[in-house]
Amino acid sequence: MKCLPAAKVAGTKGNVLHDWHAEVLAIRAFNHCLLQECDRMIADPRESSRLLRWRKPADGRGVNVNQPFAICDDIKIHMYCSEVPCGDASIELVMKAQADDTPWSVSESVPGSDVPAHLKGHESFSELGIVRRKPARGDSPSTLSKSCSDKLALKQCYSLLNAATSLLIPPNNAYISTLILPRPQYVPSACRRAFGPDGRMAPMVTESWPGDYSYHAFQICATDIDFAFSRGIASMLDEHPKGSNISAIWTPNVQETIINGVIQGRSWTDPQGASLVSKRRMWDLALRVLMQIEGVLPFGADQHVQKILEDRRRVKGDITLGALRGWILNHDDGFKRPALNWR
């Protein structure tokens, strides 16, 4: 289980990751890498970056002009997954793996939790195109974390940027260009349904939002090249391989080992256990960078933040009402965004 049980979310205050599936960690690490690049460029404006550039006046085009950086125009983002993302894109694989393909019975709600019945795991796998939760197993503690299929579908409109990174960088060019999946697991019809413009994302195809958000369908490619540590390779060495509770984060500047949503060796209750990609530490870094930018926000710094967050809330709200129906927010973890104290 690589997500935080719903009962444990309250009081974690942005220090504990709610979800540490590989796809989610990769996206969080990408955001942290961008923030580090912003920090480096602020420290020495003469520094160049392969990922980012300073924005020019011509970049405005309705985007919040206070976001001083942009992802370089020649950058394309490709994402490789060693397994098809959990949720709708892989539900046919779940059906195929069953000795009896009769959908499992479902109670009115997950026993002992406030998870609503419509937010399903693997049960009712005859229902296609729906939002599903993690973990999918019915004997695991219940969560309100949505599947990786759902989160990647959302990112096609929302961009890969999180709220903290969006304070500094607009979403242009921050969308996945290609999703690369292992050929033996790739079910084209399932991926079209989960992500494609003629699947459940159809209502979003012609939509556009303030902040320059819009639907960007990624191309899906299949590969015959196996990841050296994939489940398929492990199965060749061990008839019954077991998943590890350890997750790794790697970027050119960051290496971390995560267990149960915090740095290995730390507990949920220890603020020192917060990963660099945790909500609290990402916001700390983003606001620190923002406050160093002379002249970008001489007035209305907090209004700038509120406008960007409002645009993002609108995008997410429209998607979860139109394409990803049934999406519900996770519990509040008690995190409070630090105030902007403009010097």
Image (cartoon, helix red, strand yellow):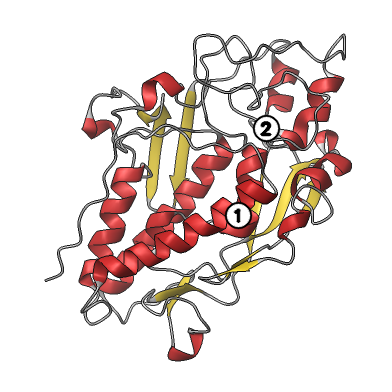
The answer to whether 53 is drawn above or below residue 227 in the figure is: below
Q: Is residue 219 visible?
A: no
Type of the residue with mark 1: Asp
**In the rendered view, does 340 fall on the left or right side of 108?**
left
Q: Which residue is mark 1?
A: 318
Q: Residue at x 45, y 25 (%)?
A: 4
Q: Which residue is mark 2?
A: 86
The answer to whether 182 is drawn above or below residue 53 in the figure is: above
Q: Quadrant of residue 255?
A: top left
Type of the residue with mark 2: Cys
Q: Secondary structure at mark 1?
A: helix
**In the rendered view, does 104 fall on the left or right side of 99?**
left
Measuring from the top left, give residue 218's x and y in whole percent: 72, 58
- Front residue of 273/242: it is 273
Image quarter where the C terminus lies is bottom left
Extreme residue in the left direction: 343
Q: Residue at x 67, y 11 (%)?
A: 107
Measuring from the top left, give residue 31's x and y in whole percent: 45, 55
